[in-house]
Image (cartoon, helix red, strand yellow):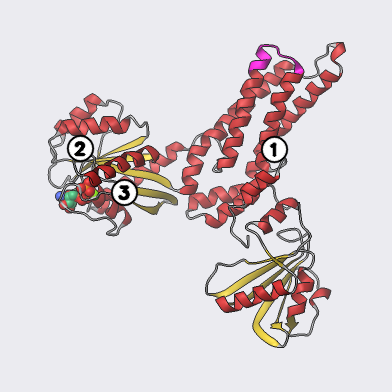
Amino acid sequence: MLSENTIVALASPQGTGAIGVIRISGSESISIASKCFESYRGIKLIDQSSHKSFLGWIKDGDQIIDKVLITIFKGPNSYTGEDIIEISCHGSKYILQEILHLIIKNGAEPAKPGEFTLRAFLNQKMDLTQAEAVADLISSESKAAHELAINQIRGGYSKSIKELRKKLIHFASMITLELDFSEEDVEFADRKEFLKLLNEIEQQLKDLSESFAYGSVIKNGVPVAILGKPNSGKSSLLNALLNEDKAIVSDIEGTTRDSIEDTLIVEGIQFRFIDTAGLRETKDSIESIGVKRAIENAKKANILLYLYDITDTDYKSILDQLKTILSFNKKTILVQNKMDLSIDDKKIRTLIKDEFPLLPPALPIITHKKESIDRLKIELIETVNKMSNASETIVSNVRHHSSLQSALKDIILIKKGMKNKISGDLLSVDLNSAIQSLGEITGDINTDDILGNVFQNFCIGK
Ligand SMILES: Nc1nc2c(ncn2[C@@H]2O[C@H](COP(=O)(O)OP(=O)(O)OP(=O)(O)O)[C@@H](O)[C@H]2O)c(=O)[nH]1
Ligand SMILES: [Mg+2]
């Protein structure tokens, strides 16, 4: 799969910057660079040892393009495992384009998305989860997402998966051995031990699989839908959380007609707050689309904030809406707004408590008071923290999650098969399928499809 060609791409962002970095990887990278580089000290790049930098001119024939610093990394001690040249030049869009063209003119090919990291994987510089973590690291926008990616890049994640897989391979080989000696009716694989192992693996796979709910929201931001009747103060709350006038606030019911979304990082965790149209029956066709969207957003969110106005005495409508919201089975935080207008909340609190005894009591707030917003933020953080489960390793990648689920399915089948005393060769089928799924996570088993899927999401130059 690994081609012989030498690739080149811009490694720094498109656009103007103080410096830009162009990276070349492949067997010809040093010779291609040396054709366009004139060192200050008159050295030849070809003769230099690895991990050294040289100052000089990038030239197209006699024409000087830029003054640059070139660094040599010789394979296998480089990111891709191949010879790499990094050119740090001035970050003008024009200079970057000119140097890229020059390198291509001298024999390199433009790199495809993720091709540097794909080469690193194929040259065993990293496994597939680590390669994926590189993309996660680049796109991490919060402390928590960054922590997940760093953990994965350090390989802690693959270690657990590889250990599980190794244990399964051991039993699979025992069972294969039994098949070879089938006439003698021996059991090399102690069934009791095996069952114990299967239970252990099943639990670990379940924990890992369940950690995905937490991992994926940490990686992509926790969606929080703000719901409630018109005028309950949802848009005011969104603005207060974001500390900016994002949504229009007015005392006219039905001000917000579409969902409005923005992100905020609180204590290292990224939240995606979604302000929605006030929930009510309406004849206005546009508003009713907004209400529909509000419900859709509620179904997609991880946390729901249900807001009611303390001066609103139409208790029945509040209770009815709350019932609908709770039927979505999401973590729901109840918020009692406009506490500056009244503190008489006995009636509504009793009604809610009687109807929904398990629901924690409403958080009283005033949207324009900082203390209220700070308390709500603490509540949100606590809610997210409760979402993480016992598993030390957290899965945040959809591909890993789906492979873990197939492995789990196989383990359950194997257990069932053993209970029904099915033959060794049938057991091996499910065993091999579980081994395959786990191997696909780390890339011990890979196909062009899997690799294509993984690396198409990378940016060019990584
Ligand atoms: N006194 C008081 N008024 C508030 C508070 N929060 C919001 N309001 C007022 O309540 C009215 C409605 O606020 P919005 O934020 O527009 O309410 P909404 O829930 O987004 O309403 P819709 O978009 O129509 O669904 C505005 O006049 C706000 O100024 C509060 O804590 N105290
Ligand atoms: Mg609004």
Residue underneath mark 2 = 281
The span picked out in magenta is 416-424
Q: Is residue 80 above or below residue 292?
A: below
Q: Mark 2 and mark 3: span between their CA atoms?
A: 17 Å
| Left or right, 364 with reference to 390 | left
| Quadrant (top left/top right/bottom left/bottom right) for the C terminus | bottom right
Q: Residue at x 73, y 53 (%)?
A: 125
Confirm whether residue 249 shows in the render. yes
Q: How would you rate the neighbour count of disc 3 (Cα within 10 Å): few for under 14, some for 14-19, many for 20 or more?
A: some
Q: Is residue 267 above or below residue 280?
A: below
Figure check: 34 above or below 258: below
Q: Which residue is mark 1?
A: 439
Mark 1 to mark 2 CA distance (whole Å)? 52 Å
Where does residue 178 sit, x and y in percent of width and height? 82, 18
Mark on residue 13? none
Rendered location of residue 22, percent (x, y) = 65, 70
Front: mark 1 or 2: 2
Crowding at dot 1, Cα within 10 Å, few <14 / some 14-19 / many 20+, comes out as: many
Q: Residue furthest bottom?
A: 62
Q: Earlier in the sequence, mark 1 or mark 2?
A: 2
Task: Report helix, strand or loop for mark 3.
Answer: loop
The residue shown at (75%, 58%) is: 81
- Mark positioned earlier in the residue sequence (3 or 1): 3
* Mark 2 / mark 3, whichever is N-terminal: 3
- Residue denoted by label 3: 259
What kind of residue is marked 2? Glu
The answer to whether 439 appears left or right of 203 in the picture is right
Q: Quadrant of residue 355?
A: top left
In the image, is residue 421 part of the stretch drawn in magenta? yes
Describe the element under mark 1 as helix, strand or loop: helix
Quadrant in which residue 307 is drawn: top left
